[in-house]
Image (tube, rainbow, N blue to C red):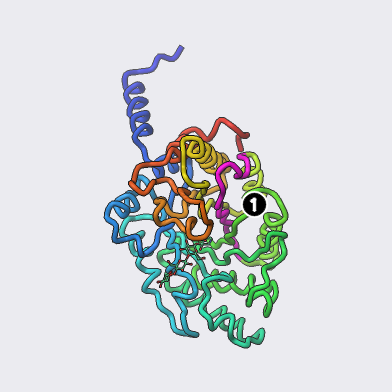
Amino acid sequence: MHLPTKINILSLSLLLASTANAKLNQLAKNAGKLYFGTATDNGELNNTQYVSILSDRREFGQLTPANGMKWEYVEPEPGVFNYTDGSVVANLATKNHQLLRCHNLVWHSQLPDWVPNTNWTKETLKAALIDHVTHEARHWASQCYAWDVLNEALNEDGTYRNDTFYAVLGEEYIKIAFKAAAEADPTAKLYYNDYNIESPGPKSTAALGIVTMLQEAGLRIDGVGLQSHFIVGSTPTIDQQISNMKSFTDLGVDVAITELDIRLLLPSNATNLQQQSKDYEASVGACVQVEGCVGITVWDFWDPVSWVPGVFAGYGDADLWFANFTKHPAYYGVEAALKNGTHKGFKG
Ligand code: G3I
């Protein structure tokens, strides 16, 4: 029998101590992931308690700007570029040595009026699209770990959303955007990002189709972002999330959980908070178990700044920290998933 030496016992106890005290990004890295991160926004950065948690690299190793890189802020008038808002979060991530997920280059929403209101031809819209993607991706080329090149292009039934880009250019607009992004920023990972593609179904199948369509055209796509805006008690199972992630990684692309939050019907109580903890544990546990899932981003970590109550009346408390900066039980569900994988589901 091999008897543990004193030095082995010492290093084992040091390891256990460091795991016991470790925070989410440290645990994610111990689990082989690149980061555990969060979205944030400029308006929140005057709260010192919030910023001290946000900037703690043991907790968050990655930031995503929730708004400042969107088209309406970056190119409010044709050919007029403004990087002020987006740079606030980008520069904070750089200062804190945190990875930056850049969000987003092309989306049907938060467009300035001139985009949907111009009387486009194929040629003029193609030129405007290339111009936007090229300028923006070049501007932050040294800072972005990844770009959400295209956001939410699909309807629930898996057909393409008939926004300005699709109506004028058809599927070609997706190739145009990814080609321009790859040329403008050769090092950022290029992602397609969407919601309701976290379990197998028509929308997820259509997202797989976007990956193969780009690959067959010889264009670069490196990953798919699974937004994961869920409702407590009705999230996909861990097995559904794992098998869905694997359907993407089987195509040779990464996946990431990019916008995780799990809203509950207010008020919160011991029962719904416990369920929320299990639901967070399942999603994070799925990522832990799939090698090609590179990291997890929550769509902000502090309830008062969540987008949820403004959009879903009666719902809230979707994040990991309550208004008074105490942690939800779900924080410990995430911690358990990162420490152990999870006890449910299969090993990938
Ligand atoms: O910038 C204006 C400000 O000038 C004005 O005074 C204020 C008054 O309401 O509104 C500000 O704009 C708001 C913006 O957030 C910045 O705070 C918009 O009204 C508001 O609609 C916008 O909401 C954002 C939402 O995207 C828009 O669809 C949320 O903060 C942002 O978290 C959310 O993020 C999206 C992802 O990009 C894509 N996936 C879904 C996710 C959640 O909706």
Q: Is mark 1 within 8 Å of ligand 1?
A: no
Q: Quadrant of residue 69?
A: bottom left
Considering every residue shown, the one lying at the far top of the view is 1
Residue 288 is at least partly visible in this image: no
Q: Is residue 85 left or right of residue 220?
A: left
Q: Position of residue 156 (x, y in %)?
A: 68, 59
Is residue 341 in the magenta section?
A: no
Residue 32: where, in percent of width, then height? 48, 42
Residue occupying the point 39% across, 51% down: 302
Q: Is residue 206 above or below residue 294?
A: below
- Is residue 228 inside the magenta stretch? yes
Residue type, mark 1 in image: Phe
Q: Which residue is mark 1?
A: 248
Vertical order, 271 against 226 (above or below): above
Q: Where does the C terminus fall, quadrant-wise?
A: top right
Q: Residue at x 40, y 14 (%)?
A: 3
212 w.r.t. 57: above or below: below
Q: How many marks?
A: 1
- Counting from the top left corner in percent of width and height, residue 261 is at 50, 50
Residue stretch in magenta? 220-238
Would residue 271 be seen by someone viewing this image from the given angle? yes
Q: State the residue in front, 134 or 5.
A: 134
Choose between 206 and 316: the one closer to the eye. Answer: 316
SS for dot 1: helix
Q: State left or right for residue 240 relative to residue 302.
A: right
Q: Residue at x 37, y 28 (%)?
A: 16
Furthest-left residue in this view = 48
| Label 1 CA crowd tier, 10 Å (few <14, some 14–19, many 20+) | many
- Residue 149: percent from the left, percent from the top? 55, 66
Q: Residue at x 57, y 52 (%)?
A: 255
